[in-house]
Structure formats: structure tokens, C-alpha cells
Image: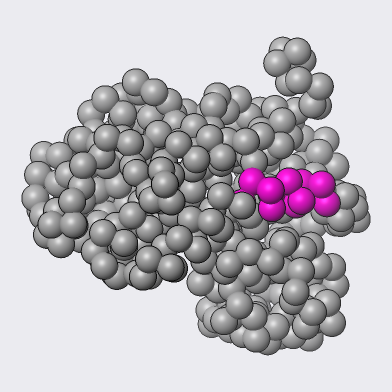
Amino acid sequence: ASAEKAGYEHFMMKEMCEEPKVIRDTVSPRIKDDNIVLDNIKITADDLKNIGKIYIVACGTAYHAGVVGKYIIEKLARIPVEVDVASEFRYRDPLICDRDMVIIISQSGETIDTLFALRESKKKGARVLSIVNVVGSSIARESDDVLYTWAGPEIAVASTKAYNTQLSALYLVALDFAYKLGRIEKDYYSNVIEGLKAIPGEIEKVLANRDTIQKFASQHYNAKSIFFIGRGLDYALSMEGSLKLKEISYIHSEAYAGGELKHGTIALIEEGTLVICPMTQDNLVEKMISNIKEVKARGAVVLAIAKESNKQVCKAADVVVTIPDVDSLIAPIVAVTPLQLFAYYMALQKGCDVDKPRNLAKSVTVE
Ligand code: G6P
């Protein structure tokens, strides 16, 4: 097995280091002459105009990718999107009809709740597009359309590179739908495509800077409880950061929307509590700085994840992990990597089995 790790100590680290490559593999084949071409998926502008609603349904990390998907599809394509955990969706008699589209996200393509949500959607007449990593898996076979993520095999139980490729696929879908519907201009469309093409290089830089995160983890791995706070897309990202940490380090953590903190959670912030703040959304930086001040005033230790150009944050946070200056819209694909690295180093410091966390399965095929 050590040979398969290609010199890495763990599959998880190997897989994080593969992120630049697998994002490129997922994005490049879908860009032809500066236009997005989603494989053989034939969805016309008329089809899109007739969609009532899009439901995104998934579990775990794939669900968190779906939360980002909701933000960007609504923002770009202006189609209403609901995102649901598969085990809830399938039992709540969702109001789907044949005018709706369901986007199913799954790394394995075999998660039982997700598969049953797919069948429920088809029964109600919805068109199902799945974003799946395993070719020929059950979910892929039963969907009307499939957009594969080309993340390759993921061995570590905690999903990393698959998430980055799920986001990449969702951005392609959101941009394609938005452009076909005439909701975004050609220039903007082209700019975001260029941005997506540049992401692998940006993640290389994040990976090369991992020492800062390792050092921070070596000082704080005894934490009993950690909060992740973010706004907008960073809130979606916070959920994934928190899940990753729980899965492999067994440290309790919660993800909170920055603005919601004062409605309860801030009562739990005390001297020394760790608060992780992704803040990649330019229009929300000021608001996040206020949140940092609020928690610091109560004794929190703050690690911020911010763009290089964000000079304000250095004065507010205790430690800043920088990411390159990418467009805020696509920042989550880059900014999740520091959160994955944080979970990894915290777990490693605690002596946990990073690749095989207790009680968890890579793919949950039973109820
Ligand atoms: C399990 C895994 C998670 C994963 C979830 C959904 O719980 O441990 O890492 O996110 O299933 O899996 P899927 O294969 O459907 O993406």
C-alpha cells in the first residue's frame, strides 16, 4: 500500500496534492474554443427557460459542494435552487414536478440515500443530472445526464480532491446555464472561464505554503471545540471545513454564518477558543472583520484565510493563511484546500488515523 501512496505518508496528503491535476482534468476537456461544452449533455436554452426549480441533493461532503452550487447557480443563472441532504429529501415528499431539474452529487455514485433520492426524483418526472466520480456507478447509470468529475480514485475516507472537482463541475454547469439563458455577458463568461483554468496553479501555491497551517496545528491541536465562521460562499466552505476537522481529528466543531453568531453561538466563545474565518468574499470583508473583533474581544484565537491583497485582516486576526487573489466567485475551490490541510495536520498532531477515521465508511451503501 505504501507504493500506492507514491512517497506520501497518507493517502489524504497525496490526494490533496493531486487537486491541481484533477481540477485541470475536470475543467479542460469541457472548454472548447473558450466555450463550455458539457460532454453530451443536451440542455438547450429553451429547456432551461422551462425549468421551474433546481434541487441539488447529496450527502456529506458532496452536500457541501451542493451548498456552493446553490449560491452560484442562483447568482449566475437566476434559477431558484434548493439544496437538500438526500436522507431528508427522499422522505419529505418534495414538491418536485416534471418541470424541475435535480442535480445529484456523489463521489462514489453508490450512496444509498442519494440513489434513492434520484429514483424518487425520476418517479416524479424530474430530469436528473448527476455529478459523479465513478464511471458506470449506480447513480451514473440511472441518471438522465452525467457530468463526471475526473478526480480519480479517492482512497482516504475524508473526501478532499473529489470536493474540489465537484465544485469545478458545478461552476461549469452554473456558467453554461447562465450564458445560455443570456443572464451573463460574454466578457464575464470568458473571464470566469479563464479564472477556472488558472485555479490549478493557485492551489499549487496554497499547497506550497502549508507550513503555516502545520505550525498553527502544532500549537493548537489540544483544542476541545472549534468554530468556523464565514459569510456567503465562505459560509458554505465553513461547513466543509468543520466536517473535515470532525471526521479525522474528532475535535468538536461547528460552522456558523458570521451574521448569525450573535444569535447564540457567541455565548460559547471564551478565552482561547479557536475560531477559523475563511474570508474570501470581497464585499463581505468588512463584515467579517467586525465578526473577528467580536470574538477576539471575548478571548478567541483567530485563524483567517484571506486573499493576499487583504491587508486589513493582518491587524485583526492572530494568524493569516493567504490564498492568491482569485475572483471571489471562484475562491471556494482554492480556499477549501487550507481547511483540508488544517484538518489533516490537527489529526496528525493528535496521532489519529488520518486515512481511516473511526466509525466512518468511504461509501455508505446501507441505510
Ligand atoms: C460518506 C463519506 C463522505 C462522503 C459521503 C457521500 O459518508 O465518508 O466522505 O462525503 O459518504 O459520499 P458520496 O460517495 O455519495 O459522495
Q: Name the residue at 53% across, 35% down.
A: 25
**Residue 228 shown left or right of residue 329 in the figure:** right
Q: Quadrant of residue 156?
A: top right
Most extreme residue toward the front is: 33
- Give x and y (percent) for residue 90: 24, 45
Residue 66 seen anywhere in this rendered image of the structure: no
Q: Main secondary structure of the magenta part?
A: helix
Can residue 149 be found in the magenta stretch? no
**Residue 95 shown left or right of residue 330 in the figure:** left
- Which residue is at the front of the view, 219 or 237? 237
- Give x and y (percent) for residue 232: 51, 72
Q: How many marks?
A: 0
- Which residue is at the front of the view, 66 or 326? 326
Can residue 205 be found in the magenta stretch? yes
Image quarter (top left, top right, bottom left or bottom right) of the C terminus? top left
Q: Name the residue at 55% across, 24% down.
A: 153
- Give x and y (percent) for residue 177: 29, 57
Image height check: is 261 above or below 235?
below
Image height check: is 269 above or below 236?
below
Q: Name the residue at 65% across, 57% down.
A: 335
The way the protein has been coloured in the rendering is one colour
Image height check: is 283 above or below 47?
below
Question: Which region shows up in magenta?
Answer: 199-209
